[in-house]
């Protein structure tokens, strides 16, 4: 059953004072780089990953020293909703072999053929939660971002993925990502 308060927030025109996003829009948040990658490494077009062997950050790829990352999503079901999910755009740390294979299949949109592989969640979710967490990275069809499933079963995040998060926990997430909770929860 859809929690009445949640239903109001999802259809609400109330906006976050910090960014102007509505509650429904904020159900999708994204990290523009793995936590370990410094802010001064500039985001480039995907073509840059093919053009250099050195450190590079693009919309979908990151090569940083010996480390390799792929853009991925992590979905957390919202409890008591009609299948709503909180979607975090995040980064998966993968082996060099996986990275190279993904790169080779990416433009053909055939990465799904890789199936699933072990990966590390490379952003702390929520912020300051420790990590990196061991995950499985599941490839998806038609150029969709691969999806992370946390495999460390004792972690809070694994529990959230398994059981879903309630409205309060979800609001806590948004607050942790710097959004103005009061403007979303209370009428302006
Ligand atoms: Zn905001």
Image (spheres, helix red, strand yellow):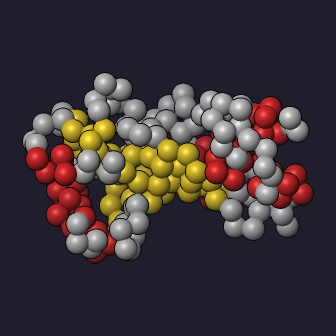
Give left or right: position of 162 versus 105.
Answer: right
Which quadrant of the view contains residue 6? bottom right
Q: Of 97 and 25, which appears nearest the observer?
A: 25
Please name the residue shown 23% across and 66% down the image. Answer: 107
Which quadrant of the view contains residue 178? top right
Number of marks: 0
Give left or right: position of 22 versus 66.
Answer: right
User: Vertical placement of 10 versus 106: above or below?
Assistant: above
Q: Of 56 and 17, which appears nearest the observer?
A: 17
Residue 99 image point, x, y percent: 22, 54
User: Vertical placement of 128 versus 111: above or below?
Assistant: above
Residue 33 image point, x, y percent: 38, 38
Residue 97 image point, x, y percent: 17, 55
Quadrant of the frame with the N terminus: bottom right
Q: Work out whether residue 39 can be spotted.
A: yes
User: Vertical placement of 26 versus 3: above or below?
Assistant: above
Quadrant of the frame with the C terminus: top right
Q: Work out whether residue 136 can be spotted.
A: no
Give left or right: position of 85 versus 105.
Answer: right
Please name the residue shown 48% across and 49% down the image. Answer: 89
User: Vertical placement of 103 versus 124: above or below?
Assistant: below
């Amino acid at each position: 059953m859809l929690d009445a308060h949640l239903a109001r927030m999802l259809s609400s025109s109330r906006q976050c004072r910090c960014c102007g996003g509505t509650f429904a829009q904020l159900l999708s948040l994204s990290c523009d780089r793995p936590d370990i990658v410094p802010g001064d490494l500039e985001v480039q077009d995907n073509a840059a990953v093919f053009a250099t062997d050195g450190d590079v950050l693009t919309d979908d790829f990151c090569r940083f020293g010996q480390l390799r990352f792929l853009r991925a999503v992590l979905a957390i079901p919202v409890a008591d909703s009609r299948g709503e999910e909180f979607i975090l755009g995040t980064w998966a740390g993968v082996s060099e072999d996986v990275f190279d294979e993904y790169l080779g299949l990416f433009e053909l949109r055939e990465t799904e053929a890789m199936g699933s592989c072990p990966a590390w969640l490379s952003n702390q979710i929520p912020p300051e939660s420790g990590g990196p967490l061991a995950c499985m990275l599941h490839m998806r069809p038609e150029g969709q971002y691969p999806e992370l499933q946390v495999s460390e079963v004792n972690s809070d995040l694994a529990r959230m993925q398994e059981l879903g998060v309630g409205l309060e926990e979800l609001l806590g997430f948004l607050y942790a990502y710097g959004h103005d909770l009061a403007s979303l929860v209370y009428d302006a």
